[in-house]
Image (cartoon, grey):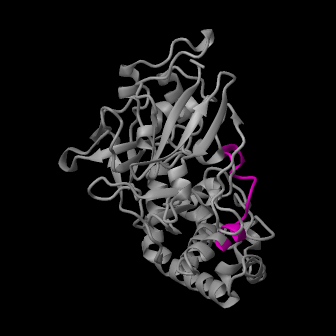
Amino acid sequence: MADVAILDVQLYGESIGTLTRFPDDRILFAFRKSYIDNADRPILSLSFKDEFGGLIADFPPTQTAALPFFSNLLPEGQMRKYLAERAKVKPIREFFLLWMLGQDMPGAVVIRPADGESAPPAINEEDEETADDQDQEGMLRFSLAGVQLKFSAVNKDRKGLTIPAGGIGGSWIVKLPSREYKDVPENEFSMMTLAKLVGINVPEIKLVPTNKISNLPEGFTSKGQAFVIKRFDRLEGGEALHIEDFAQVFRVYPDAKYKRGNMARIAEVINAESRGQDIEEFIRRLTFNTLIGNADMHLKNWSIIYPSPTQPRLAPAYDFVSTIPYLPTDEAALKVSRSKLFSEFTDDELKHFSANARLSEKIVLDAAYDTVERFHQHWKQQKKDLPISQEIVQIIEKHLKTVPIANK
């Protein structure tokens, strides 16, 4: 059994379960009995609730990939490849990525080796060169996986931003300029600024020249400005607030984030779990992203936050970008209720959405109309002052003419 390895899963500093890897690369998650027996247990994920609100505590083993909740804690795409190379682990081998990255996960989850080893054991001849202590200490951590490269960072005020040498403990997310698309940080800063004016809950944001960011990893230096957003899963003193995205909530692996679920399902969960407190905010965001032409609002771009360990709420907004200047389309990432098309974002679609999500039709329509009114007001005032090109402004204005609710 020497090849069996165990990771301890902690939530708010308390051990609540284990991830066990077997020699054939199967991974088994199990809650600890103390967590199961705790009537006031903190919520790890809504995906572990059954239809009656009880705890699901029996899981089949998975192969190579962990359960979706844990898989979605890891980065995607280029960032995953980079970190896996640094750790000398194959990108698909999620147990070892969780081992190496588990000390600074999104939310209040920490994953540590149960036996205290600093690096995972070699598992076969092909992988016998695993990460040493130095590799692990130098590895960059991440949060809120997405299109651009993102790094957790600390704010040095006058000296700019610094990527922590050990990669742990950052309170900001740094998003570097895209090599493929022009002015994406400026675009996101502008859309998030506009969203805040419209009344959406937006964390503190900045644009920072990349030459003011120190300790960027080799190969990731770039000219221009970076978009910087305050981590909403960290308090001022460094304490963690728990979060999860809707790929986790819906038990969906990251590669299916565009394929499963729709806005009505997300809204139904938010309305039920927040006891109706956050549904207008959700409608505001849905309408806003339709107006700006954000075709990338997939399951991982909606999140739940836990201000207290047992009370889910809609997390602050993130990843608001007008994507149509880069990838012209009339199709959103997910259906609203029946349709993905921006050009079919109509009163009728919102009424169907309301019925499908079991929401008050009046609340939904009133929030949508109010958002449109606020958007037009602030867009007219701000479009010349936002740090986006006239070309992007023109593309958004052309798009607005095709969105029915924007022209009532």
| Image-quadrant location for residue 350 | bottom right
Residue 205 image position (x, y, % from top left): 37, 59
Residue at point 52%, 60% (across, down):
43
Q: Residue at horizontal 38%, vertical 43%?
A: 152
258 part of magenta stretch: yes
Q: Residue furthest right?
A: 338
* Residue shown at the point (66%, 90%) measured from the top left: 362
Q: Give how far across and how far down residue 14 sits, in percent.
A: 41, 49
Q: Quadrant of the N terminus?
A: top right
Say left or right for 215 vs 360.
left
- Taking the image as shown, residue 311 lies to the left or right of residue 229, namely right
Rendered position, 326 above or below 83: below
**Where is the C terminus found, in terms of image quarters?**
bottom right
Residue 396, image x, y percentages: 59, 65
Segment tinted magenta in the rendering: 253-268
Viewer-nearest residue: 293 or 8: 8
Pick whichever, 22 or 172, lies toward us: 22
Q: Position of residue 345 (x, y in %)?
A: 72, 74
The one nearer the camera, 177 or 128, is 128
Among the 4 quarters of the image, the one containing residue 147: top right
